[in-house]
Amino acid sequence: MQVVVNKLITRYELTGKGKTVLLLHGWGDTLAGFHDLTAALSEKHQVVVLDLPGFGQTQAPAEAWDLLDYAKFVRDFLKKTKIKPSVIVGHSNGGAIALKGLGNGVLTADKLVLLASSGIRGEYKGRVKAARLITKTGKALSRPLPSTMRFRLRRKVYDTIGSDMLVAENLQESFKKIVADDVRPDAAKVKIPALLLYGDKDTATPLSYGKMLADEMPKAILDDISPAGHFVHHDQPEMVLNRIREFLK
Amino acid sequence: MKTVAVIFGGRSTEHDISILTAISSIIKPLELTGEYQVEPVYISKTGEWFWDEKLKDIQLYQSGDIELFMQKAPKVHLLFEGGLVLVKSSQFAGRKMYRKIDVVFPAMHGTHGEDGELMGILEMANVAYVGCGVAASAIAMDKVLAKQVTMSSGIYSTPWIWFYADDLATKHKKILEDIKQLKYPLFVKPAHLGSSIGITRVEEPSQLMNALEVASHYDDKVIVEQGVQNLIEVTLPIIGNNEPKPALLEQPLTKPEDFFDFETKYMRGGKKGKSGGKSGAQGYSKIPADLPHELYKIAEKTALDVYKAVHCEGIARVDLLIDSKTQKVYFNEINPLPGGLYAHNWQQAGMAPVQLVSELIRYAEERFSRAQSKNTAFTTNYLKQF
């Protein structure tokens, strides 16, 4: 289904009946990434899932957006479709959007589930830290190279550091704003019960990030999912589903 | 060996579908015939034209390397000199490359291509081209015009209304009042877009305004159609000029609530939420449609009547809606460039993809030769009188 929200064509799906669960996908992903989770949760809940602006079949914003802009967009989408979620589930950047929205009163819900949520910034170690330094100086150093070679080199460096900078190239300015925003202060203002699930093999948002967020949130439960990487709900669908079901009881 | 330029891509929401149609369903079979030199001409989403052998490789687009290619490749110029000539820089000593085109095979879906705009350029260039002409393309790609033209030929459509998108803000009461004449479910559609983009099935009045906004966002004209009860949806690919030839009536196997939106058609292999069917556009379908013989014949005749009424040539696909209880057949839409040329259907009708594209080239040449025999300019002394 589609709806026009703030002049942006927005694709969403609404399935099932019961308390409403809103699913927010990560950077570079689409609602299709939640396909199996949507199907399983909609057995006992109403599930709403959308393509966030710039991804899937939702138009990109005309200007660079930060996390709060994305959270406000989700609020306006919910208002337009007259949907009131009881639960918000956010994966990766979708988790950071949820924390930003809930922490600032832009979004409301009774419960929150974070799947490998991003939002912790500046805690880089070892090789990733070194590669990040290269990206800071690399632009000037690589300038003499031909454009094709420069582009490939840039992609290689961003791949190495696990950055999603080039995942959606038209949204690079938004991405820069988002990764400059540490959501720990927002997480501290989220007082609702929260379940945080992180994969033990996740290098993009390691378990230690989950611990940092959980430390800020008064009603947080942190669980590690093993073995699983950044896409915990793909790597261990049953385990993640059972944890969420238990939490929503 | 004749040279065929396949033009694809373009400034359309169906840009990517056009790439698939061009490479898989046109360029490959044309090359397999061994009779044509095929020149791929790609139009970017921002309207730049490129011509290069590399553009035949689907990987170029899938990998995203097309962006790099476009940064480096010379753009194409068109020369209208005794037909159509492609011109580009050879990138060597300031020299240019020229290629005279014998036949153009448009593979454009949607706006700025399938809607007659490209055909206008080709008419001006005086070159043979595959498919419907300027007027038929423009009519077919405007759902409102197509219904008006077919209605004037006595072909039924389900009840419908239309409005200009700009009027939704200022005259929405009148629009909603007009829509009250129709029975739910309704289908709200942008008038000019294909591949089900921007279409919403509306079950109840509370959903209507959002659907009208979505369609108005995409197009300057919006059409609202009444759904058909006891629905059997069928589609018929047709080729030919004066004597159109039908393939087989095809019946998409979806429930009414799973109408073929963009994702169902192109992203999930034809059926929502399921996998394992035939890949590609409308993969899940019954060919031939499961209809009683008499009804099949009525539907086939209706589709052929639509093809003639709109004055289609070369190829088109006509979509029909049938009320299985009353056995009434309604015209729904006509598509002047069926996705993948509906080769799967033609294959079942006994025509292989290689044969299909060869036939289409033959029809293009036949029409071109007929047009050349008509006088469009002659000498007068009119100006000397002033």
Image: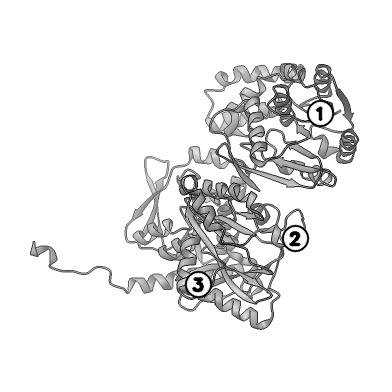
Quadrant in the picture for the C terminus of chain A: top right
Relative height, residue A44 to residue A129 (above, below) = below
The residue pinned by badge 1 equals A202
Residue at 90 percent of width and 38 percent of height: A242
Secondary structure of the residue carrying numbered label 1: loop
In this rendering, position of residue A238 left or right of residue B233: right
Secondary structure of the residue carrying numbered label 2: loop
The picture places residue A183, in percent across and down from the top left corner, at: 72, 20
Which of the two discs, 3 and 2, sits closer to the camera?
A: 3
The picture places residue B350, in percent across and down from the top left corner, at: 64, 75
Residue at 69 percent of width and 77 percent of height: B291
Q: N-terminal of the two: label 3 or label 2?
A: 2
The residue pinned by badge 3 equals B307
Q: Residues within 10 Å of mark 1 (few under 14, many from 20)?
A: some
Is residue B3 at all visible to an observer of this figure? no
Residue A70 position by quadrant: top right
The picture places residue A69, in percent across and down from the top left corner, at: 62, 27
Relative height, residue B275 to residue B377 (above, below) = above
Q: Chain of mark 3?
A: B
Residue at 80 percent of width and 17 percent of height: A216
Q: Check if mark 3 and mark 1 are on a common chain.
A: no
Q: Which mark is residue B277?
A: 2
Q: Residues within 10 Å of mark 3 (few under 14, many from 20)?
A: many
A195 or B172: nearer the viewer:
B172
Which of the two discs, 3 and 1, sits closer to the camera?
A: 3
In the orientation shown, which residue stands out farthest toward the bottom? B294
Relative height, residue B383 to residue B311 (above, below) = above
Secondary structure of the residue carrying numbered label 3: helix
In the orientation shown, which residue stands out farthest toward the left? B385
> What's the CA distance linking mark 1 and mark 2?
35 Å
The amino acid pointed to by label 2 is: Gly
